[in-house]
Amino acid sequence: MGVATQPKRVVVTGGAGFIGVHSVEALLETGAEVLVVDDLRHASYRPLPAGAELAVADIAEEPARAAIEAWRPAAILHLAAQGGVNRSWREPAEDAHINVLGTVSVLTAAMAAGCRRVVVASSGGALYGAAKRLPTPEDEPTQPRSPYGTAKLCIEHYLGLFTRTGSLDALALRYGNVYGPGQDGTGEAGVVAISSHRLLAGKAPVIRGDGSQTRDFTYVGDIVAANVLGLASTVTGALNIGTGRETAIGDLVHRLLVIAGFGGEAEREPLPTGEVARSALDNALAGERLGWRPHVSLDDGLARTLESFRGQV
């Protein structure tokens, strides 16, 4: 494993969002000083901890770069992004602006601030597309099937460029389908959060297609552990962060129905064009290089998530 030391001064872009708030909490617990850079458009209902500083700025714009440069962090955790595959098809130019240009802007600020360590949220499911090997290892050819996945691949190329040329020591973490407390249950992405929100409002959850499509559902606490390990490491390149297990959407929704004690059946709607049929991420390399492995079972994670939505509906 390439292990350095836990950085004591960290910028978290998108730190007011779902994964961001959890990550900021964990970093503060290590004793780090944390600056959050976030435009608050997709802030989590879970508030930022009082110990974090906040710069309200769009990551693609100059005020965000100025805030990062002035803070002079030892490391940056770059989580800010426009999420959602369907949204990326509706707004591919906006998706590229936020996800690609925004990331390049953050990387530029890192170099100007003398910060070499950057860990970036990437996507396993969106990058590999219709993978031939499941669970899918990092050396599987990348073949994204959406503008969102293409943007993530482009970001990884920039990380590779700046690492090869000696400007940064950058690591991309290819997350599975992240779920957990604090996720937005009112949007169009995040089947666990959306289904939980609907169930607690007395509405049936919705399954797209026949529900046989699979995903690698990874609890947010496990994702955060990988973020913290990644920031303290010298590992570069890309690592999968997932459970290595496929779960069918239909099975996932059924589990939520049982946990919630909902007596009805799920509703159905057509499957979006280009939907990936199967996804699971081989996490062996993350275990070898970061010492990371997932700890939260799916049933436990679903129960925690559903419970967290009580009082939010």
Image: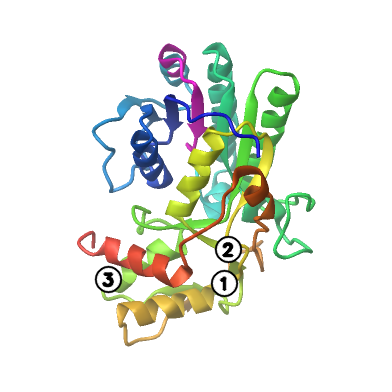
Q: Nearer the viewer, residue 151 or 274?
A: 151
- Residue 262 falls left or right of residue 12: left
Q: Amino acid at mark 3?
A: Leu
Which residue carries the number 2 mark?
A: 216
- Residue 109 falls left or right of residue 253: right
Determine contact: label 1, label 2, CB under 8 Å: yes
The part of the image, by quadrant, that contains residue 305 is bottom left
Q: Residue at point 39% right, 64% down?
A: 194
Residue 162, position as x, y percentages in the image: 69, 23
Residue 186, position as x, y percentages in the image: 35, 58
Residue 102, position as x, y percentages in the image: 54, 29
Would you say residue 263 sits in the magenta stretch?
A: no
Label 3, secondary structure: give it. Answer: helix
Tell me which numbered mark, 3 or 2, is placed earlier along the sequence: 3
The part of the image, by quadrant, that contains residue 169 is top right
Label 1, secondary structure: give it. Answer: strand
Q: Residue at point 43% right, 21% down?
A: 64
Give the residues drawn in magenta, as a range.
Answer: 68-80
Q: Which quarter of the rendering shows the N terminus?
A: top right
Is 85 drawn above or below residue 165 in the view shown?
Answer: below
Q: Amino acid at mark 1?
A: Thr
Label 2, secondary structure: give it. Answer: loop
Q: How is the image coloured?
A: rainbow
- Residue 116 falls left or right of residue 59: right
CA neighbours of label 2 inside 10 A, class few (<14), some (14 to 19), many (20+)? many
Count how many numbered circles sit on residues in the image: 3
Regarding residue 311, the answer to whether it shows in the image is yes
